[in-house]
């Protein structure tokens, strides 16, 4: 299966996300003053999608660099070897950010640029200098840096050496990487996200197999290796434990001096029942648990959602008492990447296509259409629909489930891009 690599600098603001195509034709209808005092407008990118310079100045080969060179993996043979050339043009890009009047900029650090071989090699001074330059120039322009430590790209050596996120050893590599970043950038960076969308990564890389390392099994995909029913559970478990260890590291050794906050960003869809039946209503609730609560319940309550325990049984990994101590309460904020809304159909009582009748999908089939009518205006991406009320609903879901924990919304809607806004629900 092919996947397309999008290499572009995303600089659209939240007002574009919240508008329909009709209202986009009349941008004067929306003003900055329409938003609450203290609302932070921002922009976001990730290292592999913009930096390029894939083997320059000591950077090593990443999993995405490797994946892009496999024939047939990427549509049209696209890759991120040059991309937006942000590595060489970051000053120009920061000037563009400044011209837009944004308050914050979220970007990720390329693990392979800072630690080309992880714990098995030395820190790359060129990589440290590159990100120091970005941070310093952002601050000089009055833009707050918000750093994501891991946005799905990692040194390919981890895959070759021990299977990366399938192996608990990856947790220690991530802690080491985070420590290097806190030491070198934490005096100026106060907003940290450990991992971007671990739930999406587990799905795309280990259920569908369209992200590296491209592991999957039928009926989800046609990969040479993998087990779509079990491996994503293992990968997610290791990522959540890695987050917990990094959050503990920051709290124990850096927070008192640096004064920052640490969270995680979860990919979130809102789900509506396909019909008014009790089964489909339950399926919509279950879909939220298997999509959103999968990544948040362990970090807030110390265990996976009861809905997942019910359907996975012993397949779902257990947290030890020691692990519960450092993952439980390991979030200063919830990072919200909200893309769209979908309908949910129950699959416990009937067959569903595309793996909806498997436990890893919560025995739920999701679709963007009901009786041929889309849930919202279509976008350029197949499962992304413009459903503005879905954003309010997902925020209320989080507010109610997690006792109004502070949220950082980085809401995305297809090609409209991302914005960053800090707020707490009323």
Image: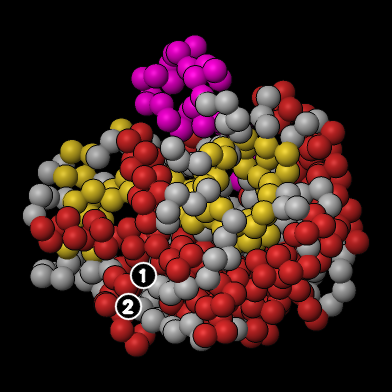
CB of mark 2 within 8 Å of CB of mark 1? yes
Give the residue displayed 42% in from the left and 54% down from the top: 403
Q: Residue 309's mark?
A: 2
**Residue 149 x/y as whole percent:** 68, 59
Asked if residue 154 can be seen in this view, the reply is no
Q: Answer with the quarter of the image where residue 155 lies.
A: bottom right
Q: 216 and 174: which one is in front?
A: 174
Crowd tier of the residue under label 2, counting other residues whose Cα lies within 10 Å: few below 14, some 14–19, many 20 or above: some
Give the residue displayed 64% in from the left and 77% down from the top: 171
Asked if residue 292 can be seen in this view, the reply is yes
In the image, taking residue 272 as reference, residue 157 lies left or right, namely right
Q: Is residue 304 above or below residue 53?
A: below
Kindly state the secondary structure of the residue where label 1 is placed: loop
Q: 208 and 46: which one is in front?
A: 46
**Residue 377 x/y as whole percent:** 30, 33
**Residue pointed to by mark 1:** 305
Q: In this view, does 396 lie above or below 173?
A: above
Check if residue 76 falls in the magenta segment: no
**Residue 80 x/y as whole percent:** 66, 53
- For the residues labelled 2 and 1, the Cα–Cα distance comes to 7 Å
Kindly state the secondary structure of the residue where label 2 is placed: helix
Quarter holding the N terminus is bottom left
In the image, taking residue 159 as reference, residue 401 lies left or right, namely left
Give the residue displayed 73% in from the left and 43% down from the top: 145
In the image, taking residue 258 as reference, residue 367 lies left or right, namely left
Q: Answer with the quarter of the image where residue 84 lies.
A: top right
Give the residue displayed 52% in from the left and 47% down from the top: 407
Check if residue 11 falls in the magenta segment: yes
Q: In this view, does 86 lie above or below 65?
A: above
Residue numbers of the magenta segment: 7-35
Quarter holding the C terminus is top left
């Amino acid at each position: 299966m092919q996947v397309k690599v999008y290499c572009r600098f995303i600089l659209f603001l939240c007002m574009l996300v919240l508008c329909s195509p009709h209202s986009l034709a009349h941008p004067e209808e929306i003003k900055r003053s329409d938003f609450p005092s203290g609302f932070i407008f921002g922009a976001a990118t990730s290292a592999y999608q913009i930096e390029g310079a894939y083997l320059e100045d000591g950077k090593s080969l990443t999993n995405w660099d490797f994946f892009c060179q496999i024939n047939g993996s990427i549509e049209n043979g696209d890759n991120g070897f040059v991309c937006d050339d942000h590595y060489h043009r970051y000053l120009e890009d920061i000037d563009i950010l400044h011209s837009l009047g944004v308050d914050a900029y979220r970007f990720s650090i390329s693990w392979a640029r800072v630690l080309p071989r992880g714990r098995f090699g030395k820190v790359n001074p060129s990589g440290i200098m590159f990100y120091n330059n970005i941070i310093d120039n952002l601050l000089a322009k009055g833009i707050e840096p918000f750093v994501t430590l891991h946005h799905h790209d990692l040194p390919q050596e981890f895959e070759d050496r021990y299977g990366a996120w399938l192996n608990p050893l990856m947790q220690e590599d991530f802690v080491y990487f985070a420590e290097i970043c806190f030491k070198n950038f934490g005096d100026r960076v106060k907003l940290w996200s450990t991992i971007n969308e671990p739930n999406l990564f587990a799905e795309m890389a280990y259920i569908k197999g369209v992200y590296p390392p491209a592991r999957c099994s039928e009926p989800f995909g046609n990969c040479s290796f993998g087990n779509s029913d079990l491996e994503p559970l293992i990968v997610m478990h290791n990522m959540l434990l890695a987050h917990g260890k990094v959050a503990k590291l920051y709290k124990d050794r850096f927070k008192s001096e640096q004064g920052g906050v640490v969270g995680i960003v979860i990919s979130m869809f809102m789900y509506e029942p396909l019909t008014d039946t009790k089964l489909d209503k339950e399926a919509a609730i279950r879909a939220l648990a298997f999509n959103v609560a999968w990544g948040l319940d362990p970090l807030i309550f110390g265990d996976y959602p009861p809905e997942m325990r019910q359907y996975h049984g012993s397949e779902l990994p257990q947290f030890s008492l020691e692990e519960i101590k450092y993952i439980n309460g390991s979030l200063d904020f919830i990072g919200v990447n909200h893309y769209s809304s979908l309908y949910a159909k129950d699959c416990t009582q009937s067959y569903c296509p595309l793996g909806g009748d498997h436990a890893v999908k919560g025995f739920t089939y999701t679709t963007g259409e009901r009786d041929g009518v889309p849930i919202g205006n279509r976008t350029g991406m197949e499962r992304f629909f413009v459903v503005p009320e879905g954003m309010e609903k997902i925020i209320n879901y989080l507010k109610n489930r997690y006792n109004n924990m502070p949220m950082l919304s980085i809401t995305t809607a297809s090609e409209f891009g991302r914005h960053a806004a800090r707020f707490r629900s009323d």
